[in-house]
Image: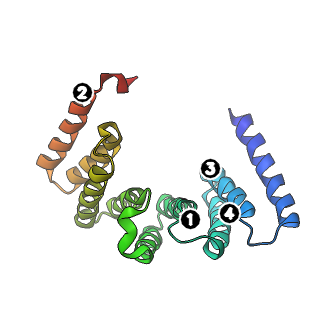
Amino acid sequence: MNGEFEDCKEFLEKAFNLGSKLYEKNDLYLATIAYNLAKYYSEFDLEKAQQYINLSLEIRKDTLEIANVDYLNTITVLATIFRETGKYTKAENLLLGYLDQLGDNKLSINRVEDLYNLLGDVYDRKGDYVKAHKVKSKVLDIAKLKFKDSPIDLIPFYGNAGISFMRYNDNQSAIELFSKILEIYNDYPDSLN
């Protein structure tokens, strides 16, 4: 498996170098390759991953609408890198700034719940359990609306919120959320496979 990753990295770096010669600096092709290189490097070299994701974000910022899912994914990866490197304030500011830019229509954006979930994780890691609890509650509300016809998709949101609620000492709510997970698994036993 490690050899496959190395082959992938080599291919992406060659494609990026070739693309840099063939395309203008603001081309989405380069942004996509930089994004994929950042995802690759995020497994073991967060500094290099941040370089590539910053490049991807810079290109996408100039060429995509802010609500575009590729732009959202790039913000998510950068915020995750900040979180994983202990740069919680940078992650928080990036996510809050992006959510603010999305404005009133943010709840209609595909995967916005992932941004809020990541923001809640950042607060958890900072030890700000009050903010984490508030954000995770909001994530649950959004997820329940988006996945009302697909309870299986709610499981990770219930689990993440349950853990966050435990840290906030809201144990009763945490128990209720974990119980909902068990109910879903009982209702959909095939989902365990």
Q: Which residue lies most toward the left here? A: 172
Q: How is the image coloured?
A: rainbow
Quadrant of the snapshot with the N terminus: top right
Mark 2 or mark 4, which is nearer to you? Answer: 2
Query: Which residue bears the numbered disc 3?
Result: 44
First of labels 4, 3 by sequence position: 3
Quarter assignment of residue 142: bottom left
Query: Which residue bears the numbered disc 1?
Result: 71
> Which residue: 56% across, 65% down?
71
Query: Which residue bears the numbered disc 4?
Result: 52
> Which residue: 74% across, 60% down?
29
Mark 1 or mark 4, which is nearer to you? Answer: 1
First of labels 1, 3 by sequence position: 3
Q: Is 122 on the left-hand or right-hand side of 162?
A: right
> Which residue: 65% across, 52% down?
41
First of labels 2, 3 by sequence position: 3
Query: Disc 4 versus disc 3: distance between alpha carbons?
Result: 14 Å
Q: Residues within 10 Å of mark 2 (few under 14, many from 20)?
A: few
- Place of residue 9 in the rendered image (x, y in percent of width and height, measured from the top left): 75, 47
Query: Callout 3: helix, strand or loop?
Result: loop
Q: Which mark is residue 187?
A: 2
